[in-house]
Amino acid sequence: MLIKENLKELKTLSVSEQNVANNILSLGVEIKDMSIRELAKIAYSSTSAVTRLCNKLGFKGYKDFKEAFLDEEKYLKGYFSKVDANVPFNKDDNLARVCNSVVHLYEETSNDTLSLIDYQMLIHATTLLFKAKNIHVICIGVGLEFAKVFADRMMRIGKKVIISDNPNFQYYYAYHACKDDCFIIVSYTGTTQRTKLYFEKIVSSLASSILITSVGENSLSKRADVTLRMTTREKLYSNIGSFSSSVSIMLIFDLLYSAVFHKDYEQNFNLKKQISKDYEPYRVSSNEVMNEE
């Protein structure tokens, strides 16, 4: 969950802590040059109340909180200048405008997702996938379809990927996780109870884990071996079609596949071509662009 959302929704705040939270939300990036004493003074509170609020949000203190909060504010103000991720078009728009808005949404989501990529994390994820004997994908909803495309591509270059839309099977795979397994867990919020149950089994085993989740901290992000952030612009319910999160998940799967492919480029390219030829040896097209030389 975003820090800003957490500040709005925390239910266990004292009056003085709530005053601090309200002032942070009101000030936004203006807290950049504020000391803990200055913030406490503006909020008619104490420095200890500021520290307690930061602790309740999962930070060691005001300095750590401020750095994360300012990073989040910077992220939220970047990209998506042309279109609203939740409502990219309106009922009065003509069809051409609707189509253009969706295209702009895809473009801005792609740029936004790329800006969130931590390349050290991506390199680590690539190494884990490359070494794993079995790769499992744990997710629910539309992410499963993108996971299936990822699995098809990976299996063409000899990497075994196991996916199931049966929640019982997902639990069994997590329960029996071992050191040869790498799990990719996809969760926008990181708070789904079923996903948290699977995750607990995975992290308590010797298996490695790659989490694809939203910006901000959640119960899973600090404990995964690798955390990759997806575009985080959508409300949970008030959006037309979850376009942005869907595109971001698809792109992250594509980046993971591309990174693994690139690690042994020549061998993977030859293997992919050979397996395609063996599977469909007589495949031709009337379109010259598609035909092999």
Image (cartoon, rainbow, N blue to C red):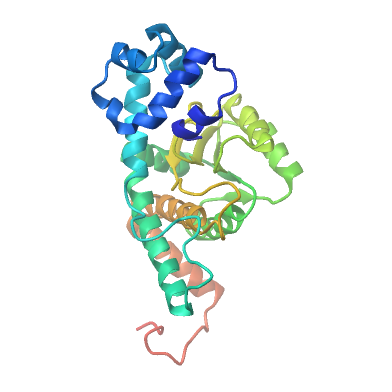
Q: Position of residue 109 (x, y in %)?
A: 40, 56
Residue sitting at the far bottom: 286
Res 188 seen here? yes
Q: Quadrant of the C terminus?
A: bottom left
Q: Residue furthest right?
A: 168
Residue in view at x 52 percent, y 84 percent: 282
Q: Which quarter of the figure has residue 82? A: bottom left
Q: Is residue 58 visible?
A: no
Residue 17 lies, with reference to residue 235, above or below; the image says above
Work out whether residue 107 or residue 32 is closer to the camera in this orientation and state it. Answer: 32
Q: Give how far across and how far down residue 29 sits, in percent.
A: 30, 32
- Judged left or right of residue 280, residue 121 is left
Q: Nearer the viewer, residue 275 or 78?
A: 78
Residue 43 position by quadrant: top left
Mark count: 0
Q: Residue furthest left?
A: 33
> Does residue 277 sit above or below 260 in this rendering?
below
The residue closer to the viewer here, 69 or 284, is: 69
Q: Position of residue 103 (x, y in %)?
A: 41, 68
* Residue in the image at 36% along x and 28% along y: 68
* Residue at left offset 47%, top offset 58%: 247
Instruction: Identify which residue is drawn at 64% across, 52% down.
Output: 141
260 shown above or below 8: below
Question: Measured from the top left, where is residue 63 in percent x and y?
Answer: 32, 17
